[in-house]
Amino acid sequence: MTVVTRFAPSPTGFLHVGGARTALYNWLFARRHGGKFLLRIEDTDTAREVPGAVEQILESLAWLGITPDEPPLFQRQREARHAEVARALVAAGKAYYAYETAEELQAMRERALKEGRPPRYDGAWRDRDPAEAPPGVPGAIRLKVPREGETVVEDLVQGTVRVANSELDDMIILRSDGRPTYLHAVVVDDHDMGITHVIRGDDHLTNTFRQCQLYDALGWQRPAFAHIPLIHGQDGTKLSKRHGAVSVLEFRDQGYLPEAVANYLLRLGWGHGDIEVIGMDEAAAIFDLSDVGRGAARFDYAKLLHLNGVWLRRADDERLVAETLPRLERRLGAPPGAEVAARLRVLMPGLKERARTLEELADSAVFLAHPVPLPFDPKAEALLTPASCAALGALLEAWRDTAWEPGPLEQAARAFAESKGIKLKDVAMPLRAALTGMTTSPPIFDVAAALGPAETRVRVEAAIERAGRLAASAVGP
Ligand code: GLU
């Protein structure tokens, strides 16, 4: 059997991390078994459809690298097929037309509740002669659900789950306007698409019982089911905006890497030995549903942030440069020039050691692109005293004949400090302040080398000039 899985989002909003994890598990499971992963957009509920949601969902999946093996299928385009299957069930005596109006159904529900019964359809039209149908009233099609026995699902995550058939009523499969209900459309589509494994959130478990009855009535083989627990926030309630970012694209915009988000979502609910950091190719070789936990997972933003740092350090420098340049442009309002890209390239190994997100990376690199005068953070500013600036001026002189590379620059600075009877850090710290405007950066001689002799000189001289100006204004006229 070739495994075929699917992800079936409704375009009622952005793709949130719960949906993304469901998609990921389906994709990995198909890859693990050399099967196919398909995408179906469940767009039958036009009233709840959000404009742009389909594009957002596709963009989110593409960003995460979760690519379907065929172009997406749109459920709405299959309504004729859904109706045809429902009508065939009527012809086979397994479903029937029911003619209650919305008001009558409401009254039925209220009556049941008043009498302490569950509000189910009472099956009024189940055994009535269709000839009694009210003229001119379009009926809805309801499935004739067995009243005895139970429906049992061998779920690959939840184990054996069962419900007494008396708990279920004759559900509508085709509305009186000829449109399918969600439960029915899913079954027909999953069957026609050849889906072998339905992996979805456990909020769908009650639907599964009903869908199994539909499979049975149609004489179709049921797919295997795996219901994965929902994602909660740290407080144990369902993850929502209140907890923080929940949409996949929000994480992208906050500077997360797709492999880190995928890694985190995978581990959220699935575990294999003590693996924490895992790439998707590796995961596809070992992913199994038996390793999916049954309890709700708690989304831990701090853990994701940490994992993102791990993936950032592993990422290719050239890719990080490409990710950082547009972020610098956003910060400075102009596209950084070629010399900035070159500086970034040289310093990337040091910069990526210190950042946990692409946004942090851009914040730490913005000094490379900033024209003088640099903005100084207060701690850096405090390091630029008249005395330390005088030392910096002398250091520039000492560097005049030094090869402009980190090693020689550092050696020359050490010799310089020694000759002045000061410590290396007494000159290195003000140098960092002058070149970056900050008190943390990659190794400062790497920074000087990346900036080049001319820019280093410009920045040091600007810092000296500024310190002089501030000292003069502090003294007053
Ligand atoms: N369209 C459903 C949803 O967005 C999923 C249906 C399914 O996976 O069977 O929750």
Image: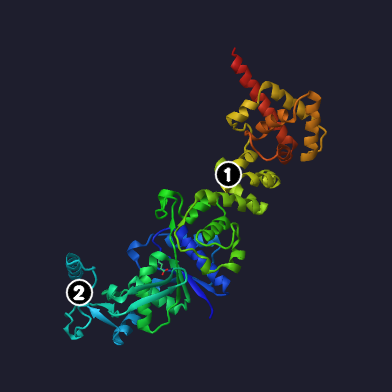
Toward which corner of the image does residue 416 lie, by quadrant? top right
Work out how far the residue at label 2 is from the one at label 1, CA to CA, in angstroms. 61 Å
Residue 373 appears left or right of 62:
right
The kind of residue tagged 1 is: Glu
Could you tell which of marks 2 and 1 lies nearer the N-terminus? 2
Viewer-proximal residue, 91 or 372? 91
Other residues around mark 2 within 10 Å, as few (<14) / some (14–19) / many (≥20): some
Q: Residue furthest right?
A: 401
Q: Is residue 472 above or below residue 26?
A: above
Judged from the image, the quadrant occupied by ligand 1 is bottom left
Q: Residue furthest bottom?
A: 92
Residue 100: assigned label: 2
Q: Is residue 19 above or below residue 132?
A: above
Q: Position of residue 114 (x, y in %)?
A: 17, 65
Q: Position of residue 295 (x, y in %)?
A: 45, 61
Residue 173 appears left or right of 68:
left
| On-image quarter of the C terminus | top right
Q: Position of residue 450 (x, y in %)?
A: 72, 41
Q: Which residue is mark 1?
A: 360
Toward which corner of the image does residue 280 lie, by quadrant? bottom right
Q: Is residue 184 visible?
A: no
Residue at horizontal 58 percent and vertical 41 percent from the top? 363
Q: Residue furthest top?
A: 477
Other residues around mark 1 within 10 Å, as few (<14) / some (14–19) / many (≥20): some
Q: Position of residue 145 (x, y in %)?
A: 30, 79
Residue 177 appears left or right of 24:
left
Secondary structure under badge 1? helix
Q: Is residue 353 visible?
A: yes
The kind of residue tagged 2 is: Glu
